[in-house]
Structure formats: structure tokens, C-alpha cells
Amino acid sequence: MLIASIALALALPAAAQSLSAPGMSAPGRISWDAEGIPTIDAANDNDAAFLQGYAHARDRFFQMDLTRRSVSGSLAELVGISQLASDVQARNLGLRRGAVKTWAKMSDDTRGWLSAYANGVNFWLANNPLPPEYGALQLTHADPWTPVDSLCVGKGLAFQLSFDLDIDPTIKLGAYQQAGQAAGFDGSTLYFGDTHRIAPADNRVSVPDFVPGGDNGVATSLPKLDDAKSVPAIGAIGSDTIDMARAFREQLQDSPLLRRALDGRETPIGSNEWVIAGSHTASGKAILSNDPHLGLDLPSVFMEQHLLSRDARYPTSMDVTGVTVPGAPGVIQGCNQRMCWGTTTNSLDVTDVFQEQLVLNSYGLPYAIVHDGQVETLQWVFQNYYVNRMSGTPDTVTRENSIGYTNGGVSILVPRRNDGAIVSITGNRGLSIAYTGWGATFELESFRRINRAGNLAEFRNALSYFDFGSQNFAYADVDGNIAYFVSAEAPLRTDLQTQNAPGGGIPPFVIRDGSGALKHDWMPLQHVQPNQAVPYEVLPENEMPYVINPQSGYVANANNDPIGFSLDNNSLNQLRPGGGIYYLDVGGASAYRMGRIDRKIQGLIAAGGNITSNDMKTLQANNQLMDAELVLPHLFSAFQAAAAPGAWPQLASLAAEPRIVEAMGRLQQWDYSTPTGIQQGYDAGDNPAALPAPSQGQIDASVAASIYAAWRSTSIRNTIDKTLTSVGLGNYKPGSRDAQAGFKFMLDNYAALGGKGASGLTFFGAAGAPNAGAARDYVLLKSLADALDMLASEGFSAAFAGSTNQDDYRWGKLHRIVFDHPLGAPFSVPGPNGYGFGDLSAGLKGIARPGGFESVDAASHDARGSTVNSFMFGSGPARRFVGEMFPTISASEIIPGGQSGVLGNPLYVGQLGRWLTNQYHPLPIPASAALAQGTSVLNFVPH
């Protein structure tokens, strides 16, 4: 356990120190406040970048090193041979190759900015001991930082938010088609109509009635194909394609860099944002709120910083604050003196996997592909790998000789696929990946320009440099404007633009044909858009979803379908101006967070407006389950039908069980909130230093939340999973979000579909039921009985000790989080590190928090949870922010963890208690205010 003396030794530096810094052109300073948030005061942008690099390295160097190596494919050099397979995949994919291309195409000015940042990192590195993780890894030195490393950090974050492999959909859809052919049902309809629906579970969108190319992004209708269908017409996927997809997936199982791409719609990455116009606020000023959702690890993804550059080349100083990404210069979410911005992830489809016909040399390695009957030469890039042996002798990093040419020693690139690599080879066939991020992209340049933007026009121009890693940008300024923009470059597929249909019935969200015969290629560049980087045809700016000063007076996004293109369950039936399919992504977007946010905002407006920043903080803390509100009426109807005269006796008997009656009473009185219900739990508004006992209302809601979460799980397993297993698809079940959406769809449309799914399969089967309605009601109530059995079972004894007393079923005992560090204990929280955060009990690891499946205060878990630990969560708000656009912007912010990534520093978890209880710290917007709060200063003078 760490002791106080270690913490004090690693605390902030004493006030008024000075350093002679080579690379600085003029005096500058870093002032830290009590939170450890640095304010950087520099004479110009390059000096500001130097100081920002120094401040990042001081508090987060190990995190920076880990990130650059994960992206570059050299992680085994740091943490050992366990990451060698991950390095092979990362090196082959080639984000670092793309970073090198970006460096070559950047302006001299931007290269100077990035070089200055690297110089600041290296100045810290040369004059300070390494963080404690290096000792655990038996390393005494670290490689110097380079500008390309910063570009890798930027590309890595964008990659995690946008790279979406088509492998899993290909495998599952192919399996559904094969099962349907064998059993006599339409497998494609089962997939898209029942279990992996394109339509979201709720219909709230960000910009209703958007038309690509319309005035201000809004018009009166969405043009569609004449033969629009509720399920896209899909061709058969070949068995050889499925086999190749399976083989590739097996290679990627343990790759942290590619885990999100394999998870697809099950990714924990998301975000919330909304902006309210002054016409609806008490102050008459716009309010912007943002909470991006990322992995809740330690140290936290973001680091707060304030940058002041008095660069004489510009008419005004750059004075910007917010959150930054350690390893890259600039602020990526925050405010300057004129405006604030926030982001959520958009699921724009910028990745296609192609099945290629290969031409092999005598060693069995491909040197060309065949496209339209012509041989096209491939490029080879040779690789070397090194591993930290951790042999007991420090710095034992040696070359790994087990990697041959056919398993990672050479990367084989396809120029036609934006230099995407061949990732899997089977005989003379292979898979390649086209992705917008493989080439030169300028997302860091975009943020650099955003930081200086003084108005809406400059902000929008800055977004034209944001090339991949699509985001939904929310904007508000002191002039009263609010806006929303979908960013990044969306490649156009030849078949969708020239044939108004996917070639051969193979859509962009499964593996596509690389031969050229089906016109699946990205279209050659003909019309260059402003500041375009991707070397293919892309959607023009006015066809990307956006709205400026909407008539509604607000705009919100929570990773939902932004314009409603998927609401009819078909993402391939809308037309662009002048023809061609208007395609953004497959659909199936998150819906429930947006559903709650939109309803709450509309309710506040209907109540007279006068919305305040505190209202927005309350909304960010909302933990009511939207899916419960929309689905439980079906359970209530089933319970009511069971009590009606003439009800099926088996149904009536089940509904009359005392435990069912009690549970139904709890659910009927529930407000859908999810408090922990225990004193050890961190609920919104609690004092984290003295947690209070829960109120009776919190206990009641907590019990209902546990019962509902268990019922959701058993309902999905008794319907979706049971039916799929019965037709041989038990290994191809949908993920949590898709399964819940399919379950809700079948309930909402039960009468219209005659008690079956869209595929004609029966999902609510009960032997002896007199009709489909009775069968449905029995399955719903039987699932409630199964849920109560599960909570009382031995598997949940660590939480509830086998109790059948429903009062014992407190949600906080199931819904917990561990803030993991890549090296595990003692770096994780809870952990043996003296920070005061302990596990709930020996058998219940983690910290209890409210929230749940798709709650606004994001804390999602497995919807099929069936063990005491399967309701835990590991992602959520990496930042909570609310800003009000007064002439001097008023803002508040919080991050999980703290500013420091150095174990032992009090600021390692300096904000965690407040984050857990939905509290904030003030965020000074003018640098003068931030500097006034400084508790220590480090001055830098040119060397």
C-alpha cells in the first residue's frame, strides 16, 4: 500500500521554478491549479505546443507510450511477448504508414507545430525519471517522441471511432441464409427483419426531414426508390467467403486494437450531446452539453488543459480550454472565448472488406490481384519485430525471429484499396481492407483550426479538414448560434451510384467482390471537395447531415440515426440529388439514450423553457431506462390478461404466484431509475467522502431495476436465443443491442405479424397455449419467474446470499465498475494502492454505480447478463461538460480519475469521487481566470 509520504513526494512542483528550455523561442510558463490542470501561457503556437508536450509527458508519459506503440505495432517492445500477435495485426493494417503519409503532406507550419510538441515531450523525458510502470516492465529508458507519434495518436483515436470490419456480419448473415435454405425460411429476412434490424428501437432523430443538398440541411421529404422495401434485397453469400471471414476472425480475437471493429454495434464507444438555443433558456444564452463515452480505464482517456498563445501572426490570441489527448497537441473538445463544441461518434461507413483474386509467386506469396481481367501489382513492406523479454536484466529487448513472411513478416498492400493490406490468404484468394484512414488525413489540423475559430464560418471551414473518424459536432457561440454537423469524408461506391442497387445484391456492410465485375469499388476521384484528403469520390459537404439554428431551438445526438434514413429498416433505398443511392451506414444505431434525451428536452420546452445549466447537468445524470419504459407495458398487459376471466389456466396460475404479484407491483410503481440502493454505492448528488444511506424510494427503485435487468435477460434468452438455437443458429446470436431491439420489435408488431417474426418463425412458443396472444403472455411472465429464480440462485449468492426476499435485490450489488490499468493491480482502482476506493466485497469486485442498459448516464452492460458479474460495465462518460454562452462563457467539467497518470500522485484519482456522484468543477474559460487559480508555476526561458 502506498503511504502519504510517497504521495507527497510525487505531488505538484513547488511554485516559481524556472527551466532553461532548448526549443523555446520566448519565455513561457505552465501554471497548475489545485486540480492539476495546467494553463499554458506562450508567446506563439509552437512554444505553446512545446509546453503542452512537456505537461502531457509529465503526467501521462506511459499512457502516451502505450498508445503510440499500440497503433504502430510495437507494443511487445514495451509490455512483452503477449502483445506480439497484436503488433503483427497493427503493423499489417498500417496506421503508422498513414501517419507518415500525413507528415509528408502537411504544411511546413503544421510540421513545425508538431515538432515543437515532440521537443517538449523529449525535454521532459531527458530530465525526469520514468513513470513507475517502466520499473515493473524492467525498462530504464523510453524511445524519444516524434511528430509521427502524435499523428499515430490522432489516427489511433479516429480509428477506434470509425473502423468497422464487415467480418462478423458476413459470417452471421451467411449462416442465417444457409440455415434458412435448409429449414425453409428466408434467412436474410430473419437477420435484417428480426434479429439484426436496421431500424432503431426508438424513432428519435437529430435533424428531422433532412434532405441531402437541401437548404440548411432541411427539406420536407426524403426521396426514395420506387421499389423501397422494409428489408434490403440481399444476394447469397458464398460459402468460401464465409470460410475466409471465419479464418480472419480467429486471427483477431486477442487484438485490443481491433476488438471494437469486431464488436461492431456492440462497441461500448458512444456519446451524448445536445445544444439548446437561447430562446429556450432562462438566461437567453445557448447551452451546450457533451459527454463522450469511452473506456473507463486509468489513467483516463482525456487530460484537461488550457492553452494561451499570443502568436503575433493572428489578430487575436488563441485562448482555448477543455480536454486533450495525451500525445497530441491542441484541445479536441472544449471552448475558446467565442464558442464551445462537443462531439459524439457517428457510424459513417468508411471501411469495406474485399475478396480478391490473387496472383502468387513461387513462394506462395501474392504479388498482384486480378481486377477487371487485368493484373494489378501489389506493394510489399517488410517488417521486423522486437520483444521486451523481461528476463531479469533491464532493457532486454531483442528481435523476434518467429515471424515469417506468411504470418506477418511482410505486409502486402493493394493500391486500389487506398493502400489497404491483404489481411488473410487462402490459396489464390485473399481479403483486403479499404479504409479512409490508411492515407494522409488531417484531423489534428482540423482541431488546430477549431481552437482558433472565432465564428461559425471559421468553425465549419475547420471541419473540412476532419477527414476520418466521423463525429457529430455540436456547436454554440456567444452570438447566439447553435449548429450540428456530421464530419469526415464518406466514400462513394460505384454500384450504389451507377446502378441504384448493390452489385449482385451484396451491400457495403458485408464482404464485397474485388474482381470489378460487381462494381463494388470506391469511385475514382472526379470532383474534389474543399480540403479533401481521401483520394476517391466522397459525399459533398451539403449532403452530409447538418443543421444551423434549427426551428425547434435545439439539436441532440446520442449516436442515433441523425436524419431517419434507417427508420424504415432499409438503409439502401434513398436517393441522392441527381441519382445514386444515398448511403451513410448500415443502420441499427443506438436509440434509447437519444429517446430519453429528446423526450426530456421537449418536456422542458413544453413546460415553458427557462432551461438552466443545472437542468442539463440533471439530464446528464439521468439513469432512467428508456427500454424499460417502452417494453414494460407489454409485460403489464400480459399480467392483466392473465387475471381476466377465461384466461388460459396455465397462464393464470403463473400470474397468481405471490412472488410474481409482488414483482409486478414493484415494476408498476417504478419510475425506471436505477439507483444503487446501498450505502456503499455512489449515487448522483452523494457526498463521495461520506456516502449516505439510501432512501426508501431509492431502495425500491433499485430493487425494481435489478428485477427488470434480470427479466430483460431471461426474456431475450427465452425468445430470440431459444428460437435461433432451434434452427441451428445458437452460435450466431445477435449482440445485446440487436437482441433487445428485435425483442421489442416483435412485441410492438405482434398482432400485425400474426404472432410471428418478420421471417415467419415463432419466437414466443408455449406448449398448449390456446392462441398466439396467450403464448406471448406466458413467455413474458415465465421469463419473470425465471428472472427471480436467477437472482435467488447460487450463482448470485455473492450478491444476494440465495435470498428470495425481493428487498435484498439491490442494483448496486450487480452494477459495478473496476477502473482498469493496462498493467492491472496495483495501478487499477479499486486496487491495493491506498486511494480509498475498495471493492464492494471479496466476491463483488468494483465500485457500485447507478445507470444501466443504454441509460443517458452511460453505464451499459450485457443485456443477457446471467452471472453475478455480467451486469458490470467498463465504459461511460470520459468527460462531462456543460457550457452556457454568456459573453464570458460559464462552464463546468469533470473527468473520471484525475489529471495525473502517475501512481502515487494524489491527482491520479483527484476527480473520481465527484465523477462517480455526477458533480463538476468550474472550468475557467479566459486564461486570466485560470492563471489566477494557479497554485504552482514552472517558468521556461529559451536556452
Image (spheres, helix red, strand yellow):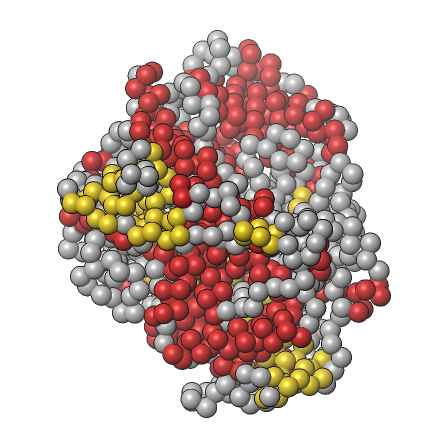
Q: Identify the residue at horizontal 40%, vertical 64% (top origin).
A: 100
In front of the other: 424 or 643: 424
Residue 840, image x and y in percent?
76, 43
In front of the other: 587 or 706: 587
Q: Identify the residue at horizontal 48%, vertical 87% (top origin).
A: 311
On screen, residue 164 versus residue 825, left or right, reads left
In front of the other: 61 or 450: 61
Q: Is residue 480 above or below residue 393?
A: below
Residue 199 in view, yes or no: no
On screen, residue 455 versus residue 322, left or right, reads left
Residue 894, image x and y in percent?
62, 63
Please identify the quadrant where the C terminus is shown: bottom right
Residue 794, image x and y in percent?
72, 24
Residue that extends furthest to the top in the rendered view of this protein: 768
Residue that extends furthest to the front in the rendered view of this protein: 362
Q: Is residue 403 above or below residue 884?
A: above
Q: Is residue 252 above or below residue 801?
A: below
Residue 239 in view, yes or no: yes
On screen, residue 588 versus residue 648, left or right, reads left
Q: Quadrant of residue 900?
A: bottom right
In front of the other: 814 or 433: 433
